[in-house]
Image (cartoon, rainbow, N blue to C red):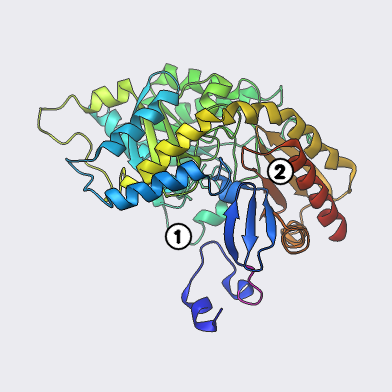
């Protein structure tokens, strides 16, 4: 690659100057693997960025996108449409928790989050409670990089240096490490942390709070799993106080935790769900907000002819994204991939936790569904990054390093032999980077 090309692209969330010294480019992908420009397979331990749930370059999805591109490239998304967007919405709500019957389309997780926050505010106003403008997120939460998302998000680096963000935002405490370390799946203790919300209500008054947004399992912060009963308790408090509950399922949606959405897995139905990533198995950018009847119906009560939600994107329900979503959702169903993910979960959990005694520098291992995190003793991310680099360059395994931990979220098509390969290669990388 020429130097001019390298320097023209300002890559997101990347130490660009470092990357320019020795880039290893991904050239193609198939199934569980990426391939570099030398055609060497790299085992995908992260489904891209938690998104390629069906694995890579699946024929049914590829053909649907090709066919759509050759038929209808684009149609305006406001006040007119194309059939594909309606079909994609229907397919999406058909796997959503009961009562979430409307899908609003965006183009990313960040846009879905900002859309959901705006819908929550508009809803409170429409139901005659305009003072409900405060938003509540959770420490360590990741909700994308829009101003709404970084405000309700609780990852300091995403926020620091970008001004004040939205006003009137508070955060519930996270539950990382509170139930001890090396907990497999959900901890049995700790649901009472949801009572933080009661403290916020006491402080600000429920009549001023619009919505609470949480990731059911916090992904980007390193697979932080809610204690048993935590989400149920949040739901109960929101119900008692007229607060909208939003689950950000950008990562946990589409089988990642062995069900269409975490809402079903945990048996807690929020008022809205934000999703993206696996919606199109990562093939074409698309995000969505799933909305319940109460919110939708309240917002459409205005005088006939009035625009109900003054919000939308040029590319909402884009034909290529809609085609990719329909094909992905059909593939998930045809191959029963969500059930497969659930079946693989036990094997994945045991394999991951077998790393515990490998190295005293490993201070925690967390997992839920087909998500996993290995955390190292704090040292500014040095070790996690070294293991990530070693795994990528020497073991042909793609992981994700963030701070002092590594995260994994393999494509849902993985078999036991893939789990074994991930764990063996990761073990060697950890060993090599002591
Ligand atoms: N919400 C969550 C929970 C996410 O994990 C992410 C991305 N990792 C986003 C929102 C933002 O999605 P995007 O990068 O597509 O804007």
Q: Taking the image as drawn, is residue 167 in sight?
A: no
**Looking at the rendering, in which quadrant would you find the C terminus?**
bottom right
Task: Give the label on residue 373, or none.
Answer: 2
Residue occupying the far bottom of the picture: 3
Above or below, 286 relative to 100: below
Characterize the magenta stretch by its predominant secondary structure.
Answer: loop
Q: Which residues are magenta?
A: 20-24
Percent of width and height locating residue 100: 38, 24
Percent of width and height locating residue 219: 60, 42
47 left or right of 416 in image: left
Q: Which residue is mark 1?
A: 162
Task: Give the label on residue 175, or none.
Answer: none
* Number of residues whose C-alpha sits closer than 10 Å to that of mark 1, classed few (under 14), some (14–19) or many (20 or more): few
**Looking at the rendering, in which quadrant would you find the N terminus?**
bottom right
Q: Residue at x 57, y 23 (%)?
A: 265
Nearest the viewer among 73 and 250 is 73
Percent of width and height locating residue 158: 52, 55
> Is 22 one of the magenta-colored residues?
yes
Nearest the viewer among 31 and 244 is 31
């Amino acid at each position: 690659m020429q130097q001019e090309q390298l320097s023209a692209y300002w890559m997101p969330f990347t130490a660009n100057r470092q990357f320019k010294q020795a880039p290893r480019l991904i050239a193609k992908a198939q199934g569980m693997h990426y391939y570099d420009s030398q055609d060497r397979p790299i085992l995908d331990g992260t489904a891209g960025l938690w998104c390629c749930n069906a694995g890579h370059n699946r024929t049914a999805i590829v053909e649907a996108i090709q066919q759509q591109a050759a038929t209808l490239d684009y149609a305006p998304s406001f006040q007119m449409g194309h059939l594909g967007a309606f079909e994609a919405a229907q397919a999406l709500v058909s796997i959503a928790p009961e009562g979430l019957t409307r899908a609003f389309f965006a183009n990313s997780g960040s846009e879905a989050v900002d859309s959901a926050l705006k819908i929550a505010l508009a809803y409170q106003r429409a139901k005659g409670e305009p003072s409900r403008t405060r938003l509540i997120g959770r420490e360590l939460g990741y909700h994308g990089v829009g101003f709404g998302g970084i405000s309700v998000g609780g990852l300091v680096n995403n926020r620091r240096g970008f001004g004040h963000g939205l006003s009137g935002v508070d955060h519930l405490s996270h539950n990382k490490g509170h139930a001890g370390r090396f907990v497999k799946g959900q901890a049995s203790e700790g649901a009472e942390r949801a009572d933080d919300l009661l403290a916020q209500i006491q402080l600000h008054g429920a009549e001023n709070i619009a919505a609470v947004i949480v990731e059911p399992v916090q992904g980007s912060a390193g697979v932080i799993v809610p204690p048993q009963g935590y989400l149920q308790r949040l739901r109960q408090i929101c119900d008692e106080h007229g607060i909208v509950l939003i689950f950000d399922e950008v990562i946990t949606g589409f089988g990642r935790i062995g069900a269409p959405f975490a809402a079903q897995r945990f048996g807690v139905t929020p008022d809205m769900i934000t999703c993206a990533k696996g919606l199109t198995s990562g093939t074409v950018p698309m995000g969505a907000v799933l909305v319940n009847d109460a919110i939708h119906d309240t917002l459409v009560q205005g005088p006939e002819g009035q625009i109900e939600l003054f919000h939308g994107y040029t590319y909402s329900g884009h034909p290529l994204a809609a085609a990719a979503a329909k094909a992905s959702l059909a593939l998930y169903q045809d191959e029963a991939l969500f059930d497969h993910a659930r079946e693989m979960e036990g094997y994945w959990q045991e394999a991951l936790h077998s790393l515990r005694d490998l190295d005293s520098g490993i201070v925690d291992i967390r997992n839920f569904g087909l998500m996993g995190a290995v955390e190292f003793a704090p040292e500014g991310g040095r070790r996690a990054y070294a293991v990530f680099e070693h795994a990528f360059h020497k073991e042909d395994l793609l992981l994700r390093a963030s701070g002092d931990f590594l995260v994994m979220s393999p494509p849902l098509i993985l078999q036991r032999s893939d789990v074994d390969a991930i764990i063996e290669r990761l073990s060697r990388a950890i060993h090599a980077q002591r």
